[in-house]
């Protein structure tokens, strides 16, 4: 007997445009990921940026651009709204 996998319903209340802009402008702090509810990745972006004396903020910049282009999912696995 297999257990059914949980599939989140609907679309997120979070905007991919806001998440992308936050990622581009405040990627050093992981702001885009915190906004999306992905705190684990947000904390990782912040730690990498601090440890590399700011060079890790490139991760947030690229992440923000990719969110704008491809979209993404929020902390509950729902796709971000346009």
Image (cartoon, rainbow, N blue to C red):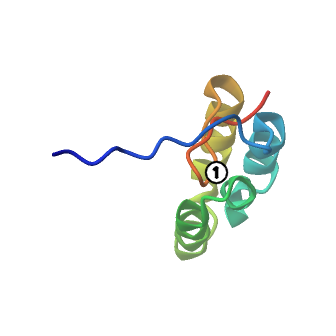
Name the residue at 70% across, 55% down.
27
Element carrying mark 1:
helix
Position of the C terminus by quadrant: top right
Residue in the foreground of this view, choosing between 5 and 12: 5
Q: In the image, is 65 to the left or to the right of 7?
A: right
Q: Residue furthest front?
A: 1
Q: Which residue is mark 1?
A: 60
Position above or below: 50 against 6: below
- Which residue occupies the foreground of this view, 38 or 57? 38
- The image quarter containing residue 47 is bottom right
Q: Residue lying at the far left in this picture: please name it.
A: 1
Residue at image point 80% right, 50% down: 22
Residue 48: where, in percent of width, then height?
52, 67
Residue 57's quadrant in the figure?
bottom right
Whether 43 is drawn above or below 15: the answer is below
Percent of width and height locating residue 69: 67, 24
Between 68 and 16, which is closer to the camera in this rendering? 16
- Seen from the viewer's position, the closer of residues 10 and 74 is 10
Residue 27 relative to residue 18: left or right = left
Please provide percent x and percent y for residue 71.
Answer: 65, 30
Residue depicted at x 67% and y 61%: 30
The percent coordinates of residue 78 (x first, y second) are 61, 41
């Amino acid at each position: 007997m297999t257990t059914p996998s949980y599939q989140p319903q609907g679309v997120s209340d979070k905007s991919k445009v806001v998440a992308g802009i936050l990622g581009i402008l405040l990627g050093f702090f992981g702001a885009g990921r915190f906004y999306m509810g992905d705190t684990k990745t947000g904390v990782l972006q912040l730690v990498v940026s601090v440890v590399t004396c700011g060079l890790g903020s490139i991760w947030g910049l690229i992440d923000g651009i990719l969110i704008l282009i491809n979209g993404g999912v929020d902390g509950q696995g729902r796709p971000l709204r346009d």
